[in-house]
Image (cartoon, helix red, strand yellow):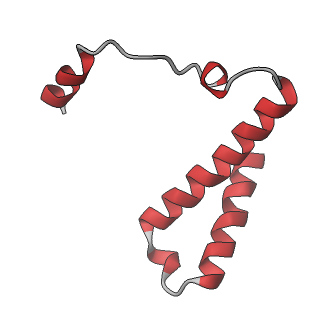
Amino acid sequence: MGAELAFLWILTGVTAFRDGAEADVIGRIGCQIAGYGLVFYALLRVYGPETRIRDFLALRHTHPAFYPLAVVVG
């Protein structure tokens, strides 16, 4: 719920300063990424202050063979 509220708060700020932002899908996605990113960062700082962001989000390196496979499948 906090992530959604952060997203709506950022979206309200963006639409107040930019004409036509209500219909801009890319702008809405950017606001959603920013809102959820802020909440993820806050959760990380509260519950795992010594943890790296890569470990918190379970991101890891990919084997180089998957890149050509992604190009072919994509």
Q: Quadrant of residue 57?
A: top right
Residue that protrudes farthest toward the left in the picture: 72
Where residue 38 sits: x, y (%)? 71, 47
Q: Nearer the viewer, residue 54 or 15?
A: 54
Question: For the C terminus, which image quadrant?
Answer: top left
Residue 18 x/y as whole percent: 56, 83
Which residue lies at the image location 65% right of the left edge and 82% below the top edge? 16
Place of residue 49 in the rendered image (x, y in percent of width and height, measured from the top left):
83, 26
Please indicate whether residue 31 sits to the left or right of residue 73 in the image: right
Asked if residue 1 shows in the view, the reply is no
Q: In the drawing, does residue 53 fall left or right of residue 63?
A: right
Q: Residue furthest right?
A: 46
Q: Position of residue 2 (x, y in %)?
A: 78, 47
Give the residue at x 62% y 74%: 14
Quarter location, residue 67: top left
The answer to whether residue 67 is seen in the rendering is: yes
In this figure, what is the number of numbered marks? 0
Viewer-side residue, 29 vs 57 = 57
Decide if residue 66 is on the left or right side of residue 11: left
Q: Residue furthest bottom?
A: 19
Looking at the picture, does residue 23 appear above or below residue 26?
below
